[in-house]
Image (tube, grey):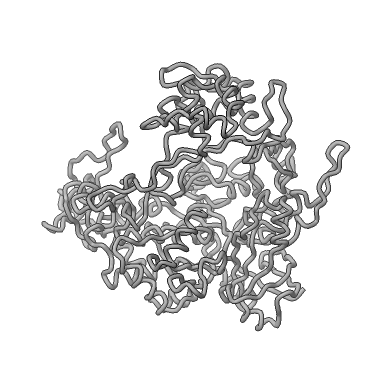
Amino acid sequence: MQTIARQIVRSSNDGNLKFTVVDPVMCGGAVTPGNENGKWLPIKPATDGAFIMALIQWIIENKRYDEIFLSSPSLEAAREFGYNSWTNAAHLVIVDEKHPNYRKMLRPGDLGIASDDGKETDEGTIEIYMVIDKETGKPALHTEAKQAELFFSGTVETRDGEKIKVATSMEILKESAYRHDMETYAEACGIPVDSIIEVAKEFTAHGVKVATDGIGGTATSNGVHLTFGIYLLPAMMGSFNKKGGLINRRMAYASFGKGPRYNLTDIEGAPKSEGIFISRTGVRYEDTSEYKQKVAKGENPYPSKLPWHPVGGGSDNQAIYSIINQYPYQAKIMMNWMFNPLMSTPSAARKEVIEKLADVNVLPLYISFDAFMGEATYLADYVIPDTTQYENWGVGYSEGSTQTKMSKVRWPVVEPMTMKLADGRHACFENYLIDVCKEIGIPGHGEKGFKDSEGNYHPLHSVDDFFLCAIANVAFDEEPVRDISDHEIDMQGLRPELEKWKKILKPEELRKVAYVISRGGRFERYDQGYTGEDDTDSKYPFTGMVKFYVERMATSRDSYTGEYYSGVPGWYPERFADGTLLHDKFPESEWPFAGVSYKAKFRSVTMLANSKHLRDLSKTNYIEININDAKKLGLKSGDKVKLISPTGGEIIGTLLARPGIAEGTVATAFGYGHWEYGARKHKVGNKTIGGVKEIGAGVNITSISMMDPTVSGTFALTEMMTGGPSRNGGLYRIEKA
């Protein structure tokens, strides 16, 4: 992140980069008065979707999109025009409500056309879609048309003469974007129409040299459409895989998978996971036994007991609410690793949530792996001491800030402070798992751990066994790295480490692994990330389909209302599970503020609170509002105020009024307001530890984040399609304490 920040500052100061920060909070120094190339737009929390849809509408209205790219219906067609990615913008969707495949993409079989659609290959299932060929004006396989009609709404005819109503993905997106006018979007998000148009003009004025990024603001109860829209904006400009545009993320050397030296993935006899995520994610409610049983009884299946989230994978915040509500099943054991959900999960710090997590009748066994006595760890029945990042191993990758491959490596630079086991290993999460798996006989642990490239077993008895072999994969991927020299070994003091590592690694691996470790990873040359005659094409392009219309989203129903989700992004104000808008239940006159949290420079949700030096630099957080809002309330900076939630709960903190907060917004920096992490005294054996009051300074908004009163049970305001947390948005009011 520091690298990105330096690049932004340097490029914007040089006049080579213009950027716009759309955020309710101005922080971090990204936008400064002296930098004319950076602009801050103070948007209302949880209204980013309105801003995005306004941009999309303007781009469509003024035809500022890359029509050639969007009209190329396949990767092969796109490549003929110099692109290394493609979209389904011109693909046809069935919009006929009477058709059995309503809301699905139109496929050859729907028209009675023979094709390879559905054929299984080594690369996966072949999927063939239909488009309107631009040259003939007739339906065609997406793999056969060079260019397709981008905007189309009408009927196509089957071999039997039946007519089917269809529309292109882009046409459906256009309809969604034009559902509201620009003035409505502007009023919703608090950004003037002129400012929106200015951003749209600038965004579309540089060809493919444009990109978007989003973090934090997507964690709202309507965040999925914001995320979707952010993703589509550069796609409309054809900027994927282009220099100055969006590049592939997480390009790394082989490590934990099937690598050149070891196969750490394919374990013979490994048990397969069964059942569904307790978080109720990635599963359509219509596929559950609850739904089927209700239908069999002739009952209305909606709503479900708790919402089901058909899009996305496992969700830690939803797992918490499933556990405390014992739905869809009771969790008998919860294992928590280096995670503090009470601080990071909206509403999880509420009294009613904590009481249920501590109730053995609700959660019989809770095991926490942690280096610190955090809020969630304090509730555990058993605490397994874990190591910090300076005491353990890690292999990471680029998060998108580089256009070349990189694998970051972390190794224990100090001896862990955790207890030593009988065999000399230190207690930690990984060693615990290895020992338990060995004890109960799970394949892939013990003498027959995983296999090397020659098919021989390599033992897995310790965390070192695993990570050193993963780093060997990094070292040998593609062209192997060179051996580390004796001089480098002595200069970095690695000789004692090599003596330990040679017990695990093969002789030809030892010095190459040490070479990677000594450099903190393996990094491809920064200037080798682009190819092509003009050096503008990404070396590692994303070649998958960029979806303007997502079939899984469009064919899934809300488990509470029974309504279909949209397959394209749109503007949807925050609402509860039953569809009620927040302000319809809690009037704006009584609850005028929307909440937002942000990351302070010197804090996070975990261990940084334990650093005295960082505490001294930033002793507390504040309840922050705009200076104009403060005047209306008759408040000033330094006043003690109450922040109150309409669904119960209040916190008392110090007010900070400043211009860098959007009006109608209340902001708090997270990572403060601890009641554990050393804030309270605890007796461990005969020793009393903790009791540092400064650790508990400030406020924690998760203790009063909004609940959803329309859901039976204890449940937080949630993004319904994915189960994403609502860290931003919601409703509040402020009173003098």
Report whether residue 264 is seen: yes
**Picture coordinates of residue 121, whole percent (x, y):** 28, 32
Judging depth in this view, the residue of 374 and 570 nearest the camera is: 374
How many numbered markers are drawn?
Answer: 0
Residue at 15% in and 53% down? 161
* Residue at x 65% of width, y 40% of height: 388
The percent position of residue 567, horizontal first and vertical second, equals: 37, 57
Which x, y percent locates residue 494? 58, 30
- In depth, the one of 375 and 580 nearer the eye is 375
Depth check: give the residue in front, 511 or 522: 511
Identify which residue is drawn at 64% across, 42% down: 338
In the displayed orientation, state which residue is furthest to the front: 487
Name above or below for residue 470 compared with residue 339: above
Using the rendered image of the protein, determine whether residue 331 is visible from the camera's viewpoint. Answer: no
The quarter holding residue 406 reads top left
The outermost residue toward the left is 136
Q: Give how far across and how far down residue 699 sits, in percent.
A: 71, 62
Q: Residue at x 82, y 51 (%)?
A: 691
- In which quadrant will I find the C terminus? bottom right
Q: Quadrant of residue 199?
A: bottom left
Q: Nearer the viewer, residue 582 or 338?
A: 338
Up the image or down, 332 lies above or below 465; here it is below
Judge from the rendering whether residue 724 lies leftward or rightward of residue 10; answer left or right: right
In this view, 647 is above or below 538: below
Which quadrant of the structure image shows residue 371? Answer: top right
Q: Where 590 falls versus 602 (above or below)?
A: below
Q: Is residue 129 left or right of residue 374?
A: left
